[in-house]
Image (tube, grey):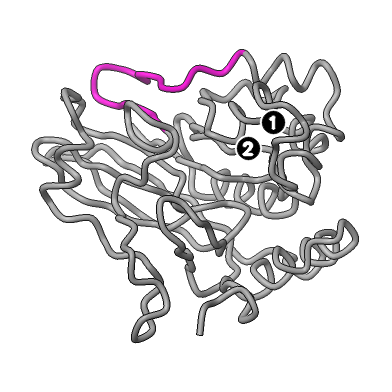
């Protein structure tokens, strides 16, 4: 079995098109979508229109939940922009997406962890952002990753949310994050200030291939027209996104000294 995993598209239609073309080139039996699909200052409605007819197995991320449940005045600028772009059919599609999905007896899909769309699984936030160059992040320990696995027993678990490609053996489960299709850097304040950076603007996805000895992981970094995506972010008054889209890094003005 060959599974293409995509996540965190964030309305970046050119990146999505490049990734779908790369998946078609590599070949996959199924492509799964791990959430945070539309939210961003890019092309949320157009991305929905591209994905909905494909009928891919898909789950909701935290941004889908926020767009559908939060009051507009309490939303982030990213989600508020998205809400204003969506039509009823787009919202209905988002509302139909479950928070987790068992693709089969071997494969589980989630966004953050099996029990939360906000908790990072394979990375952990630290309270030392800016000290000695710290980004406020570190890879999760084996104990942390095991605790986040909970009672899950699927041999392969696919997650997203952090935008960072990573794979870790957690007990009997291989946990794989394919990284983000559409945004390769961001900063956040919760539970402590931190930023996530991949370091290049390439769109990311992962190919999982079932082999006799277990699952093989191929992480893909795909070039696309990130200059056009950055220009769209600038047109929508998001220079922070524009910098991240061009570089795969957080804009210096948003990094603590």
Q: Is residue 6 left or right of residue 121?
A: right
> Whole-Å distance between the Cαs marked 1 and 2?
9 Å
**4, above or below 257, in the image:** above
Q: Quadrant of residue 113?
A: top left
Q: Residue at coordinates 65% horizontally, 45% vertically from top-left? A: 10
Residue assigned mark 2:
37
Q: Which residues are magenta?
A: 96-110
Q: Residue at coordinates 54% horizontally, 62% vertically from top-left? A: 187
Residue 188 drawn at (x, y percent): 52, 57
Q: Quadrant of residue 116?
A: top left
Front position in the image: 248 or 186: 186
Residue 135 drawn at (x, y percent): 41, 72
Circles 1 and 2, Cβ within 8 Å, touching? The answer is yes
Q: Residue at coordinates 70% horizontally, 38% vertically from top-left? A: 75
Classed neighbour count for the residue bearing mark 2: other residues with Cα under 10 Å, few (<14), some (14–19), many (≥20)? many
Q: Is residue 103 magenta?
A: yes
């Amino acid at each position: 079995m060959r599974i293409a995993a995509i996540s965190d598209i964030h309305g970046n239609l050119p990146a999505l098109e490049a990734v779908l073309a790369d998946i078609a080139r590599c070949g996959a039996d199924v492509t799964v979508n791990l959430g945070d699909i539309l939210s961003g200052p890019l092309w949320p409605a157009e991305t929905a229109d591209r994905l909905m007819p494909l009928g891919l197995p898909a789950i909701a991320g935290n941004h889908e939940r926020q767009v559908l449940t939060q009051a507009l005045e309490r939303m982030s600028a990213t989600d508020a922009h998205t809400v204003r772009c969506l039509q009823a059919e787009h919202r209905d599609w988002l509302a139909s997406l479950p928070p987790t999905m068992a693709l089969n007896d071997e494969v589980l899909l989630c966004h953050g962890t099996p029990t939360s769309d906000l908790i990072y699984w394979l990375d952990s936030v630290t309270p030392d952002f800016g000290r000695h160059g710290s980004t406020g992040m570190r890879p999760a320990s084996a104990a942390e990753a095991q605790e986040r696995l909970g009672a899950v027993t699927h041999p392969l678990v696919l997650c997203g949310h952090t935008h960072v490609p990573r794979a870790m053996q957690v007990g009997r489960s291989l946990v794989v994050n394919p990284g983000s299709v559409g945004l390769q850097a961001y900063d956040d304040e919760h539970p402590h200030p931190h930023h996530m950076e991949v370091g290049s603007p390439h769109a990311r996805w992962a190919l999982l291939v079932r082999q006799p000895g277990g699952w093989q992981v191929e992480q893909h970094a795909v070039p696309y027209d990130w200059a056009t995506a950055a220009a769209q972010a600038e047109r929508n008054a998001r220079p922070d996104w524009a910098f991240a889209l061009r570089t795969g890094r957080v804009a210096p003005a948003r990094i603590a000294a």
